[in-house]
Image (tube, rainbow, N blue to C red):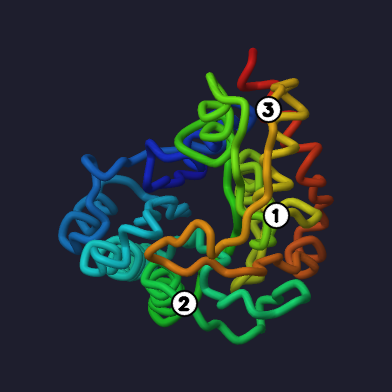
Amino acid sequence: MINILVTGGNGQLATCIKDLESTYSDLNFIYANSAQLNIADFDAVQQFFSTTNFQYCINCAAYTAVDKAESDQEKATEVNVVGAKNLAIACAEKNATLIQVSTDFVFNGEKSVAYTETDTTNPTGVYGATKLEGELEVAKNLEQHFVIRTSWLYSENGNNFMKTMIKLSEGRDLLTIVADQIGTPTYATDLAETIIKIITTNNTQYGVYHYSNEGVASWYDFAKAIFEESNIKIKVLPIPSKAFPTPAKRPHFSVLDKTKIKTNLQIEIPYWRDSLKKALANSYE
């Protein structure tokens, strides 16, 4: 039996892992939310790791409030940097592998072709900067690690763009959506399956990887697809980012190159719209 700690246990990605776990009888997932384990507390992490012999830790815990992070840098640093470091140290002591979930926000979005794992990082806000620092702390403190950068994560669970759009459409006949930020929506269940495959194949090709669904979209495209696939009749108008100013600057282009993870794991990554259909079907069950 392989013991796997999943931090951020109530979050979107952890919930998707939980939905898949019955398929894997030889994997024992132990979920810890922030109330059960404060990853920023070194002693608490040490104590938690002393209770079970973990072979893996999937760090889904993160401070992800992108705009709020601009005025709450201390809290973002605690979770995204100190927490990641504490988990890496504990994994190193127990000879466990850490799978650290990271973000496209480590890039500034000024490229026009997909970002590879070796491209220069240059975050434009506190959220991206703290997630990048967390990546570096993991690499510094633990050889046995995977950093998986992802983008535009959504699912039937938690708070995300897909669910927000469906809710906003209720009682409205018009929405305006940003159309000049380009990336790829990522179905959290697809990411969860990929993370589990790293574990079940006993992969030891450690390092940084990119994972999102295939294809390219703007937030406007994503919203239009959500409504089309849901048969929701609503007018959607594209607007530029400058018409919707936010405290944190968003990358204008954050498409991720997945060649490395596809080659390493021999996986086929679904097209984003195909995965959206699955997520919506599950939502309306």
**Which quadrant would the C terminus be assigned to in this image?**
top right
Q: Residue furthest bottom?
A: 120
Disc 3 crowd, CA 10 A, few/some/many (<14, 14-19, 20+): some
Residue 182's spot in the image, x, y percent?
69, 61
Amino acid type of disc 1? Answer: Ser
Of the residues under marks 2 and 1, which one precedes in the sequence?
2
Mark 1, residue position: 218
Q: Nearer the viewer, mark 2 or mark 3?
A: 3
Q: Is residue 51 above or below residue 150?
A: above
Q: Is residue 11 visible?
A: yes
Mark 3, residue position: 234
Q: Is residue 132 above or below residue 165?
A: below
Q: CA distance from mark 2 to mark 1?
A: 19 Å
Nearer the observer, 48 or 72? 72
Amino acid type of disc 2? Answer: Thr
Q: Residue at x 32, y 46 (%)?
A: 52
